Image: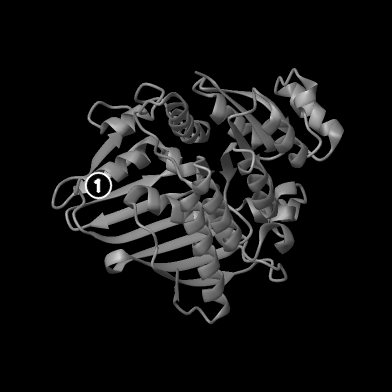
Amino acid sequence: MKLRFGMVGGAAGIGHVHRRGALMDDLATMVCGCFSSNWDRNLVRANEWHITDESRVYKDYKEMAEKEGARADKIDFVCIVTPNDSHYEIAKAFLEQDIHIVCDKPLTYTLEQGEELARIAKERNLLFAVTYTYTGYAMIRQIRELVDRGELGELLYINAEYPQDWLLVGLFSDKSEQAMWRLDPAKSGPSLCTADIGTHLEGLIKMTTGLDPVRVLAKFDTYPRDLPLETNTTILAEYPGGLTATLWASQFAIGRECDIAIRIYGSKGSVEWEQQSAGVLKFTKLNQPTQILSAAREYLYPEARRLSRLPSGHPEGVFEAFGNIYRSFCEHLIARKTGTTPESFTYPTVEDGVVGMKFIKACVESNANNNQWVAL
């Protein structure tokens, strides 16, 4: 069985990554879309992406939701790849047509909007994935297996970071369309760095440990100083059982690109993973030498092996991470439609997106109140 899907947004930015991820395992085919509010640009993208039926190239998301919802061969799911402020209205329109959702993060503009989408999806029994990109890496799943099987022992401390310099470079080169809309609170919400990449760290901790934060203490920094939103965030988070985590995300860290990393320390061992070496996991047991685990090797747990497409030693990256999220989502949806049980369907859900919104809201409140602890 092959699923049908469409996309809202995507004419610029990360839309092509979503599309490649959705198509990677031949579980779905793109049949429609509203890729841009500019009709000419919309048609160009539709042609580039082989949408042969021009009647399924729509002028706006409302028309797309209504007309697709009325078709006998309507899409099974829609990818939402637009600025933050539009996610809620678009997702709600498609949920009301009983169309499943894959949405870019953060989930919505406000927590209340995210909670409503989660409620609607639950009431209508619809799948809703949120693309926290880095959760799709095979070695992230290996960390989760190590944690779940108790190989790290009691978790004691987590450190996660995501430094990059692209926004600062974009501002000073005046070449980044993405940077411009992200700096507008009306588009991105009350947070920039925390919502844009800090939430990736919260999602990564959730995927590797299964834990949601209990409370946070956040300090925002902004450069250039006159920007309305933060471009650097430092967060102290407490997880169940008194587990402490530090999260640092920056968009003015000159010389850093997408250097996301996570380190988890337990009473029996530790793990360390960096995106720059995404197929490698450092695993150290107490009082033993560090082991270097490689993706796609037989000694990994089955779920980690399942998420690798290439033989060991061949690097896989962001396209494959997106592909793993879409594959798990599509396998789950196909199983739902055929009444079977999929091998696995590990992907971030709308409930994870709601936790992400709570995380952002609490960090904004903490920073505004002289860096006090705020409960989620």
| Residue 311 horizontal/vertical position (percent) | 36, 21
Q: Which residue of the protein is positioned furthest toward the left in this rendering? A: 287
| Residue 331 horizontal/vertical position (percent) | 44, 28
Q: What residue do we see at 34% from left, 52% from top?
A: 210
| Residue 192 horizontal/vertical position (percent) | 62, 60
Rendered view: 79 above or below 370: above
Rendered view: 53 above or below 130: above
For residue 110, say whether it is visible: yes
Rendered view: 185 above or below 41: below
Q: How many discs mark residues in the rendered view?
A: 1
- Look at the image and name its color scheme: one colour
Crowdedness near tag 1: few (<14), some (14–19) or many (≥20) residues, C-alpha within 10 Å: some
Name the side, left or right, on which 313 lies relative to 364.
left
Q: What residue do we see at 37% from left, 42% from top?
A: 140
Q: What residue do we see at 38% from left, 67% from top?
A: 214
Q: Secondary structure at mark 1?
A: helix
Instruction: Classify residue 291 by image quadrant.
Output: top left
Name the side, left or right, on which 146 lies relative to 84.
left
Name the side, left or right, on which 162 lies relative to 265.
right
Instruction: Classify residue 56 by image quadrant.
Output: top right
Observer-nearest of 59 and 94: 94
Amino acid type, residue under disc 1 in the picture: Asp
Q: Which residue is mark 1?
A: 148
Quadrant occupied by the C terminus: bottom left
| Residue 86 horizontal/vertical position (percent) | 70, 51
For residue 253, say whether it is visible: no
